[in-house]
Image (cartoon, rainbow, N blue to C red):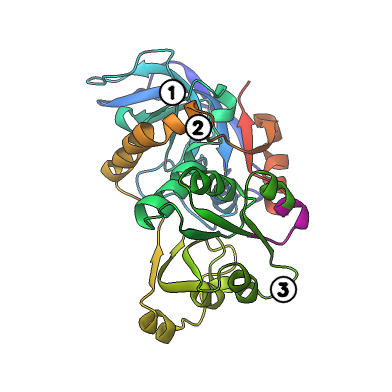
Amino acid sequence: MSGRSMRALVIPPGGPSEVLALEERPMPAPGRGEVRVKVVASGVNRADVLQRRGLYPAPPGAVADIPGLEFSGEVDALGAGVTGWRPGDRVMGICAGGAYADHVIAHGRELIPVPATLDTVSAAAVPEAFLTAWDAMHLQGGLQAGQRVLIHAVASGVGTAALQLARASGAVTLGTSRSADKLERCVAMGLDVAIDTGRGELVKAVKAAAPDGVDLILDLVGAAYLTANIRSLRVGGSLICIGLLGGASAEFPLGLVLSRRLRVQGTVLRSRPLEEKIGLAQRFSREVIPLFERGALAPVIDQVFPVEAVVEAHAMMESNQTFGKLVLAWS
């Protein structure tokens, strides 16, 4: 640790779950291969809310009482052996915890350059949403041009990222929400088929647009949609589950999975080994950052809060009224 200090939003031990305390912490020093980033903004994710409530603890090796999975800022200090970065470079990235602080340590090879088309605050809304969506749809799901992808919770941060990525790849997009207003906004972004799950039966709506079923489903809901998801896939289709907002347990229609040769896969970024995260970040930098530079992709931000308003930001996240991402700004 250096003699300086940093500010961090900390989960107080034994304190009320709605509180995150702004505290001074020792300034961390980067180790070999690491970079210290002066954080300009931190993305807000549902995982942060769950961690604050004691329902989603940080994985081993991650800071336990400072939540936060994504950040943007400027390179502040370099550890031994770091190449490719200089102090002042604008960067963004993901971490297993600790992003709710005005400085964070990250492996140098895991950092991603901020596209020239984005301001640094807006960049905090990119890493978790776009890495998650791109990895799930393209690397895990193999989405191709002309295929049909169903994106649940399409108005969420991950959903709006997935919508843009799918359109950029030439896929046909179907998206769900329980809000007609949110769906209208997604249609304005290019969503091909809007499905209001508060108005009717999901499988019927999917089959009306894609009689043979969809090729790929990106699911943030989980158990509540499991059977409908299986019934909505074409023969040989894939379901990629990245969230469990609708529960973690459900009856599994295994007969349909076998007879229709379906693939069901789960994925998460937070607990992956460092080398996997590095590989993902470097490939993302090569293949996806140019799409931001060309204007094909941009984060959708509902609201930017000052860090002092983190309680309000979490309350907004829990209200499920957001469209896109929430961000905390450190200045």
Q: 79 and 253: which one is in front?
A: 253
Query: Which circle marks residue 71 in the picture?
Result: 2
**Residue 6 percent coordinates (x, y):** 51, 23
Frontmost of labels 3 and 2 is 3
Between residues 321 and 264, which one lies in front from this camera angle? 264
Q: Are marks 1 and 3 in contact (CB under 8 Å)?
A: no
Magenta span includes 180: yes
Query: Which amino acid, mark 2?
Result: Phe
Q: Which residue sits furthest left? A: 81
Q: Are marks 1 and 2 in contact (CB under 8 Å)?
A: yes
Q: State left or right for residue 164 relative to residue 182.
A: left
Instruction: Determine which of the numbered discs, if any, sits on residue 37 in the image.
Output: 1
Camera-side residue of 23 and 127: 127
Instruction: Identify the residue shown where x is 55% and y is 24%.
Output: 118
Q: Is residue 252 magenta?
A: no
Mark 3 → mark 2, Cα distance in angstroms:
38 Å
Give residue 200's mark: 3
Image: 291 above or below 135: above
Q: Mark 3: which secondary structure?
A: loop
Residue at the image point whose x is 69% and y is 41% from the top: 313
Distance from the alpha carbon under mark 1 to that under mark 2: 9 Å
Quadrant assignment, res 328: top right
Residue 71 % position (x, y): 50, 32
Q: Residue at x 69, y 32 (%)?
A: 305
Amino acid beneath label 3: Gly
Q: Return the mark for residue 127.
A: none
Residue 130's spot in the image, x, y percent? Answer: 48, 42
The answer to whether residue 140 is visible is yes
Q: Position of residue 3 (x, y in %)?
A: 42, 15
